[in-house]
Amino acid sequence: MDIFEADDNSTPLTTEEKSGLKLKWITLRSELNEAEARNIAQAQLWLMTAKKKDICSAAFLCNLHKKMFGDVWIWAGEYRTTERNIGVAPYQIPTKLIQLFDDVKFWIENKTYSNQEIAVRLHHKLVQIHPFPNGNGRVSRFMADLVLQRLDGRSLYWGNVDLVNVSDIRSKYIDALRKADTGDYSDLLAFTTGLDEMSFS
């Protein structure tokens, strides 16, 4: 399988972005997934010791993305510069992120939503903006968990599987994200609570 082959729900990379792969020995998709997983594990260790004063900022988001993918991709932590099948236009990314993080701070300060819904809305909006060439789902899930951990010491439930790979759980997750695009967060809230008995339409 082509290591850069993407399913319909993944972000395709440009030729230039593909050339940004640091580990030239990688020839299989499984090897790429393993390399990224190792890098993400290192980022988790960094998060345990790093001083995180303002996690609701574009600067922290970019730094986190670089920590998660910087051993694998040259462009880790840098905004994408090309159009995608999902996401805002590249020139809108910095402004949209500022607006989003301002919104999140407002929601927290004014208790606009429950803590879980604040984290879920942050996750969804980051996926919608799609600031990076790849890894947007993973970094947005990290960000949502970090916000919820800071608010009440817990993390969201993400299906207990690797949501990068195609699966029934990933399909439910994608469907819930698409429903959230319409403004209805009910399925995404149910998914991140682990309510498996909830039907996803």
Image (cartoon, rainbow, N blue to C red):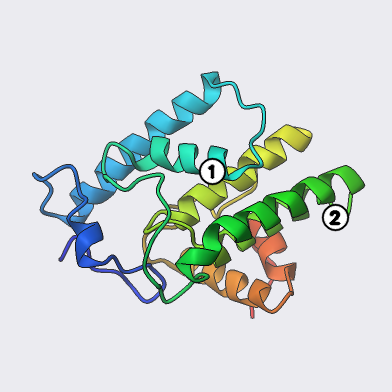
Residue under the image location 50 percent in, 70 percent down = 87
Q: Which mark is residue 61?
A: 1
Amino acid on which the number 1 mark rests in the picture? Leu
Q: Quadrant of residue 159?
A: bottom right
Residue carrying label 2 = 113
Q: Which mark is residue 71?
A: none
Q: Residue furthest right?
A: 110
Q: Secondary structure at mark 2?
A: loop
- Nearest the camera: 89 or 13? 89
Instruction: Count residues near mark 1 (Cα–Cα under 10 Å), then give few for <14, some for 14-19, many for 20+.
Output: many
Residue under the image location 42 percent in, 77 percent down = 85
Residue under the image location 31 percent in, 69 percent down = 12
Looking at marks 2 and 1 on the same chain, the residue that comes earlier in the sequence is marked by 1
Q: Is residue 178 visible?
A: yes
Please determine whether, in this image, residue 50 is positioned above or below residue 140: above
- Nearest the camera: 97 or 116? 97
Q: Position of residue 23 (x, y in %)?
A: 16, 42
Q: Quadrant of the C terminus?
A: bottom right
Is 165 placed left or right of 88 in the picture?
left
Q: Position of residue 66 (x, y in %)?
A: 40, 39
Amino acid on which the number 2 mark rests in the picture? Tyr
Q: Secondary structure at mark 1?
A: helix
Instruction: Count residues near mark 2 (Cα–Cα under 10 Å), then give few for <14, some for 14-19, many for 20+.
Output: few
Q: Residue furthest top?
A: 49
- Mark 2 to mark 1 CA distance (whole Å): 22 Å
Q: Position of residue 79 (x, y in %)?
A: 43, 54
Mark nearer the viewer, 2 or 1 = 1
